[in-house]
Amino acid sequence: MSSKFTAEELKAEMLKKYPAKVARKRDKQILVNKHVGSFEGRPTTPEIAVNARTIPGILTMRGCAYAGCKGVVLGPTRDILHIIHGPIGCSYYAWLTRRNQTKPEHESDPNFMTYCFSTDMQEEDIIYGGEKKLRRAIEEAIAIFKPKALDIFSTCPVGLIGDDVHAVAREMEAKYPDVNIFAFSCEGYKGVSQSAGHHIANNKVFTDVVGLGDMIKPGKFRLNLLGEYNIGGDAFELERIFEKCGITVQATFSGNSTYEEFASSHTVDLNLVMCHRSINYMADMMEKKYGIPWFKVNFIGAEATAKSLRHIAAYYDDKELTARIEAVIAEEMPAIQAAQAKFRPRCEGKTAVLFVGGSRAHHYQELFRELGMETVSAGYEFAHRDDYEGRHVLPSIKVDADSRNIEELHVEADPELYKARLSEADKVALKAKGILMNGYEGMMPEMAENTLIIDDMNHHEAEVLIDKLKPAIFGAGIKEKYVIQKSGVPLKQLHSYDYSGPYAGFRGAVNFYQEIDRMVNATPWSLMKAPWQESPELNAAYAWVG
Ligand code: CFM
């Protein structure tokens, strides 16, 4: 690591502020990355303790299960009418704050994304129950908007007072048989983070939507893109590339998506998994029930995009498709090379720290690498061990009470719709081509040794990083942004992209190079003094109490 401090020293510095018990727990959640062995030719790493409850008193940067279900997985779907059952705050803060964009094909097509539907629970509803109000809200929404599908999201009080949202959904569906109505028990407290909400969302969309439709888009090579949420227009750039390659995206879960696309997504021959953390459940369940194989892709980074496209070509093993994909890569690459020639010399050798949800702290390392920048420390808000260490560790993950809380669906092959797409020989051939079916390599094996891995980072630990590492840029989110920037380090929001994007695909890579160059080479950061540097009286010491 190119700093005066070793990763071990940084870790010790972080832990020394904590009471002994807290330090013991954080010790297992902060790791110096080492490649200790190998599994099928890839490095293995030490075990990291993650997906655990945040210690009370720590200012975590995590979100809640409701955020993962409503905000992340279902939010980007434009024509399912999302009713949030709960107090208005939960609805307001999930209203278009994620920058997931959408583009209806025709002006007359429904787009409910700009609306915020809420039952606006009041004290009276908490005392006497909110089901009546929920029923009324559904009736009103159907009368005005006439949606094909309507879903209900439970916020914390709903679970606490025991409203049966599923019974209401069934009852209303009986009354309005043309509308698919389903509900999520995704109360914020349902898990230790957003991750629980992803799983809850995957389960319900799988049981209540997937498989109901028969809208088949034209094309010889049809696939679904799972775990791409169209932040800042990423999905639009990917759609452009797929179209150019002659590939049909039947459904995206869930960037720029529609209900009908979800409903008929079981008709494809391949699922691509972009964000493994948020949607790997769906990929697994679709494989079991319909026989659709999946592999992991990454469209963040030009090289990663080209590699993912080549894997798709290898999967279909079709001469024409392969030639077309190679032609597209050849056509796109000159612009990338020109941009790299311009921006790389200005960024090379600089360092980045990345702390994002459950996949971007890994994916974005590709883009920084293309600029010659090293990611010296990285972590996730809510990832599981497989996201850090690789999917091969799945069988050794201990299921704790919090994870057991989330239903694991028992899925069997559909007697009519199951169709195996690959023979055992095909799988062996794909492996020989470097495609890891049903696999994910994880972040740590792909990061350099002696980098610092921090799960569920908090502000204290972020301050140590800033202070001691002085990275050229910090990639994280809005909760971190201004604290970090006051310390004189630019922060790029890798959740919302601030006001910019897309960053996926080829054109996205060029956007990103330009943006990072602008940020790491801007002089105001080094000239700026934090308020406490100018007024020493603001530089108060803080200490743990207890
Ligand atoms: Fe997947 Fe995401 Fe992420 Fe995520 Fe998220 Fe997001 Fe994220 Mo914010 S689904 S895990 S729950 S890639 S909203 S689009 S940026 S934390 S790293």
Image (spheres, helix red, strand yellow):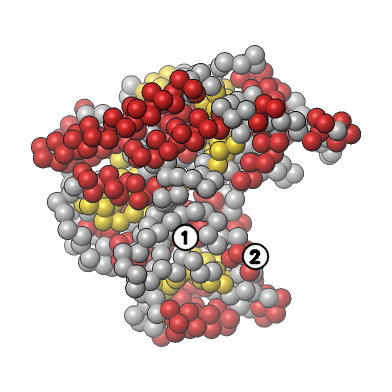
The amino acid marked with disc number 1 is: Gly
What residue is shown at x 45% (from left), y 50% (from top)?
A: 231
Looking at the image, is 113 positioned above or below residue 330?
below
What residue is shown at x 51% (from left), y 18% (from top)?
A: 349
Query: What residue would you read off at disc 1?
Result: 75
Q: Is residue 407 left or right of residue 462?
A: left
- The picture places residue 175, in percent across and down from the top left corner, at 41, 85
Quarter of the image that includes the N terminus: top right
Whether the residue under disc 1 has CB within 8 Å of ligand 1: no
Q: Identify the residue at the far left of this view.
A: 319
- Label 2, label 1: how far apart the Cα atoms are: 16 Å
Is residue 410 among the parts visible in the rendering?
A: no
Q: Earlier in the sequence, mark 2 or mark 1?
A: 1
Q: Is residue 512 left or right of residue 487?
A: left
The amino acid marked with disc number 2 is: Gly
Q: Nearer the viewer, residue 165 or 310?
A: 310
Mark 1 residue crowding within 10 angstroms, few (<14) / some (14–19) / many (20+): many
Query: What residue would you read off at disc 2?
Result: 89
